[in-house]
Image (tube, rainbow, N blue to C red):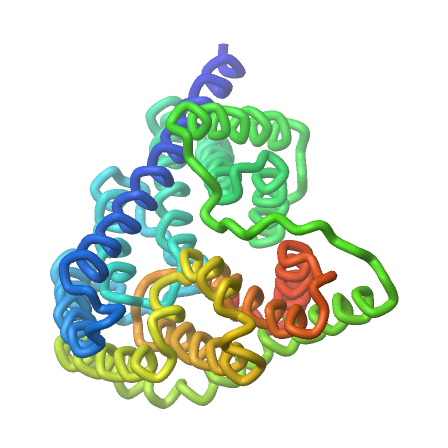
Amino acid sequence: MKFIKLIFSTILVGVGVALTYYIFEAVVRNSIDYIWYDLFDTENNRLMMVVLTFVITALFFGSQHILDKKSEKIESKGLGETPNATITNFFKVLFIGFLSLLAGASLGPEAILVPASLILGSVAGKVFFKKESQIIKLMAVVGFVALFTSFFNSAIAGILGLLLALQQSGAKLKPIMLIVSIISAGSALLTLSIVDSKSLVQVPAHEAKFTIITIFIFVSLFAIGYAYTNILKFVFKALESVKKHTINQKWFLRSLLASSVLSLIYLLGGSLIQFTGNESIEPMLEQASALGFFGLLWIAITKISAITWSKAIGYRGGMIFPTILVAATLVAIFRIYTNEIDITYGIVVLLSGAIFANTKAKVLF
């Protein structure tokens, strides 16, 4: 009876997380498109970009101050902070996170959706299994797996999510974990296929060619990814004094500082580096030859600046998905000289180097 209940609750969590991802991502994307591009045309009217950054950033910091005052004093980790597992906190996490991304934070939805998915799993665990703490923790992992499946529209990504969850918690893999993870991933995939959802990141298809030159470039990209994570660590250390000084300031002063610097970075870097960056990959690749080496390098530098500032000053969001734009930009630099480099493989290799470095640096998640 308990096993049947576990399977049923796992399916519910898989469906619930997939729908949460789908709805949240659609609301964020459509809101940004409507407000920033259709209504105020910030791509051409850069002064309006500055105004919107100031106004919506104030809404974000003000809402956080009213709804989740405790979090103002806590430095958010790479995959976000998870409050007590209640339905109220589930909606608070999503609403405040939505305002952060809408305000222009150069961060990804993962650090908002991870806590939301963990809460959803834990709530389901509490409903079906009352005070059985081990099963409640297992249901939180189920939510995590369903989210990773949803991000990439792939069951393999879901299983990688399980391995990441185990690495983070230090727990050992058990057969029941694998069983519920597969069911959770399958439920999420089925739900996403029904609503016709796509993965969060889309890149043009390209056939890879493996030669001595491309293998050398892949090794270089891995090394660049490794260096990237350590650069993030260095920049965060440099911003520590800013964080210490601002963390006890009034919320509206933090809002003013946050939006001032972020809008300046966006003025310098252009519209391609705004927001998470997943929507900018294809436009950036289309413009790559026109941008050239220095143009692409400038996009990467200003994007890294926007990511580190957004995270350090207190916007909500993660650094993994914004890093994909940085990775795509650096791959595009190599593709100026040879088009035999597959974009997807290049991004994966660079991210692998970044994640490998993160085992010591502990900055990405």
Horizontally, residue 200 falls left or right of residue 353, namely left
Residue 264, horizontal then vertical, whole percent = 28, 84
**Residue 176 picture quarter:** top right
At 62% from the left and 62% from the top, the residue drawn is: 351
Seen at 45% across and 17% down, the residue is: 8
Question: Is residue 133 something that shows in the picture?
Answer: no
Most distant residue in the front direction = 290
Which one is in front, 347 or 317? 347
Taking the spot 36% from the left edge, 90% from the top edge, the residue there is 241
Whether residue 103 is situated above or below residue 138 in the rendered picture: below
Q: Residue at x 79, y 56 (%)?
A: 209
Q: Is residue 336 left or right of residue 137?
A: right
Choose top left, top right, bottom left or bottom right for residue 140.
top left
Q: In the rendered image, is residue 330 in sight?
A: yes
Question: Which is more toward the observer, 268 or 70?
Answer: 268
Q: Position of residue 325 (x, y in %)?
A: 50, 64
- List x then y, in percent, for residue 55: 12, 70
Q: Position of residue 296 (x, y in %)?
A: 52, 77
| Up-down relation of residue 196 to residue 334 (above or below) | above
Is residue 251 or residue 317 the one in the foreground? 317
